[in-house]
Image (cartoon, grey):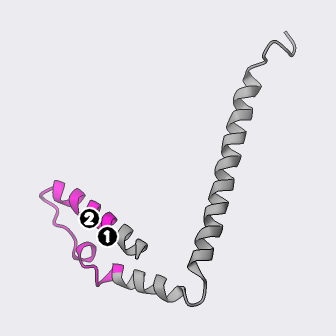
Amino acid sequence: MITAAIVGMLAGLASLVFLAVPDIPVPGWLTDQSGAWGALLHGAAALNQFVPLGTAIAILGAVVASFGIGVVIRLTRMIISHVTGGGGST
């Protein structure tokens, strides 16, 4: 349900981009939700029978969060390494 809403919003955003340029018509596969997007959403729903998507999303969220924490720690250490704070060699 959330995936369908996200795909619908992205399709609407892409439609607006295509409508901003009047010479290019909006492609049918973008506006037809029962076409390619419908097949994609049906495949994602069918995958839920084999892989619990709630668990997969929680694990993916934990991986992304740990990656973000690692990036913040690395950036902090890089910034601190440039500031001697009065110590170190002169």
The answer to whether residue 66 is above or below residue 84 is: below
Seen at 48% across and 82% down, the residue is: 44
The answer to whether residue 3 is above or below residue 76 is: below
The answer to whether residue 10 is above or below residue 73 is: below
Image-based side of 6 in relation to 27, left or right = right
Element type where label 1 sits in the image: helix
Image-based side of 12 in relation to 86, left or right = left
Image-based side of 47 in relation to 17, left or right = right
For the residue marked with disc 1, what is the amino acid? Gly
Residue 11: x percent and y percent? Answer: 30, 67
State which region is magenta: 8-37
| Nearer to us in this view, 71 or 62 | 62
Toward which corner of the image does residue 14 lie, by quadrant?
Answer: bottom left
Q: Which residue is mark 1?
A: 8
Q: Which residue is mark 2?
A: 12
Verify whether residue 2 appears in magenta: no
Determine which of the numbered discs, if any, sits on residue 28 in the image: none
